[in-house]
Amino acid sequence: MSLPGRPPGEQIPLVDAARSAKGAPWIVNAALVSLRRDLLLAARRRSEVLTALFFFVVVVSLFPLAIGPEPALLRRIGPGALWVAALLATLLGLPRLFAADHADGTLEQMALSPQPFALQMAGKVAAHWLLCGLPLVLLAPLLGLQFGLDGDAQGVLMLSLLIGTPLLSLIGAIGAALTLGVRGGGVLLSLLVLPLYIPALVFGAGSVEAEAAGLGVRGHLSVLGAMLALAVFFAPWATTAAVRVALE
Amino acid sequence: MTMKPLNTFHFASPATFYPLAGRLQPLFALLALALAAAGLYVGFFVAPTDAQQGEGYRIIFVHVPTSWMAMFLYCVMAFWAAVGLVFNTRLASMMASAIAPTGAMFALLSLLTGSLWGKPMWGTWWVWDARLTSTLILLFLYLGFLALQAAVDDPRRADKAGAILALVGVVNVPIIYFSVKWWNTLHQGASVSITKSSSMAQTMLLAMLLMALAFWMYSIAVALARVRNIILEREAHTEWVQHAMA
């Protein structure tokens, strides 16, 4: 894709800056630069990030209202409710992942730049996790208190969300890339992505339950970690392929 | 060896495949009819009444083959999607799009017949059994593929996007199956088990296999018919289609 003369990637100063950074392996820099860029963009539009967080809190609060305030029941459904809400909150942030960059042509420039495209996409996914996933992990104990979860369950819940939310971002990015510039993208995105989220949900919410049942959580968390390892390796490539399809 | 090497890509062109599909399609349709007739005959008149489940078990001759086909067709669809993505052949992608609705139909039929069977046998229309749940998710995956292809206007882009989704899905199908299975065993004891006794009567197995083959032939016939329509639709600008339609 490289053109003779000056590479077209120079139109994005941030991406270009990565190439000029000598010494450090600039291949990794490509990911870091797109990560920093997305974080910077989010810092300038904070309300979007906060909206997803409030959505998470509101959805979680709906469960006791719908089901009733009985503490034993709430303790039972708490982890599942939190996990489902985390799934939906992550989903909410996904259309933003590529849409703006697609609309103003930045994504095209990224694809044309000599930096590895997959790593740039990986950087974007990492930014999505830092903005949409990590806050959920940090907020989870507070909401867990509302459901009367005890200390051990809280710890397991946080740990499962910590391993699980990056997985959600990675899988979701594939769906976000596939629905880029497609009619009814938002609804379609949820249809594509939610079935693929099921294993994460099963093992994430299951780990807390296994802890409560005294079965030990290592099995669940290990499987969750294994899925994350797989996704870290494969998902950016699938995302890249999907973005390239959208750019054609 | 003086034989001319077979040109594998000869039929990869829609123009050459269209008449071939037209010739093959009635053949497979007839085979499907004959096999279904044989399978239904063996299933309803030859196979003995089940000792535990009575006559109601006979829905198995429809239910099990539909479940097989639902899973099998997803793999076939993903295969053609991958071929289309790798070799950039239009026809392979068209095959993937042609197979998807049939696969979705089989997944839906499998769920419907399963619940019809479940009501008299287990006393409930639905249990969150690992197989039922994973078939439901398989149906969602089919619907996602169909919805994505329908939402993209440019057919080539729809092909590629669908192919990526099908490949991601096919990697996920075993993961989903095992996670649901594990989830199921954790949540509820083996209150309901649809594991069939291994000492199944020979005639029952025969009827099931005949029906599975019939559905297989049906899928091929329908996929060929559908791919012919897709070819006509997409190649409408070409001379040979205009000539054939004239």
Image: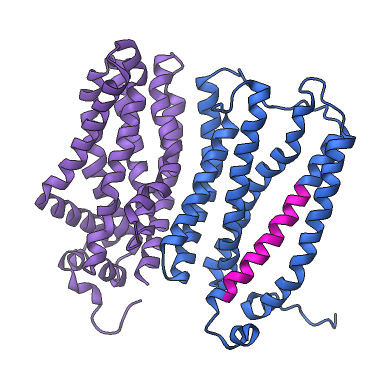
User: Which residue is rendered at x = 30% and y = 33% of the image?
Assistant: A85
Chain B tint in image: blue
Instruction: Name the residue at the right extreme.
Output: B46
Where is residue A57, by image quadrant?
Answer: top left
User: Which residue is rendered at x = 28% and y = 21% of the image?
Assistant: A64
Mostly what secondary structure, the magenta segment?
helix
Q: Position of residue B116 (x, y in %)?
A: 65, 32
Q: Is residue B49 left or right of residue A174?
A: right
Quarter holding the N terminus of chain A is: bottom left
Is B136 situated above or below A9? above
Where is residue A81, by image quadrant?
Answer: top left
User: Which residue is rendered at x = 51% and y = 33% of the image?
Assistant: B179
Residue B80 seen from this side: no
Residue A152 seen from this side: yes
Q: Position of residue B105 (x, y in %)?
A: 60, 49
Q: How many marks?
A: 0
Chain A tint in image: purple
Q: Is residue B222 left or right of residue B146?
A: right
**Nearest the eye: A138 or B225:** B225
Q: Is residue B28 left or right of residue A2?
A: right
Q: Position of residue A133 (x, y in %)?
A: 26, 40
User: Which residue is rendered at x = 61% and y = 32% of the image?
Assistant: B115
Quarter holding the C terminus of chain A is: bottom left
Asked if residue B218 lies in the magenta stretch, the reply is yes
Instruction: Name the residue at the left extreme.
Output: A44
Q: Which residues are magenta?
A: B212-232
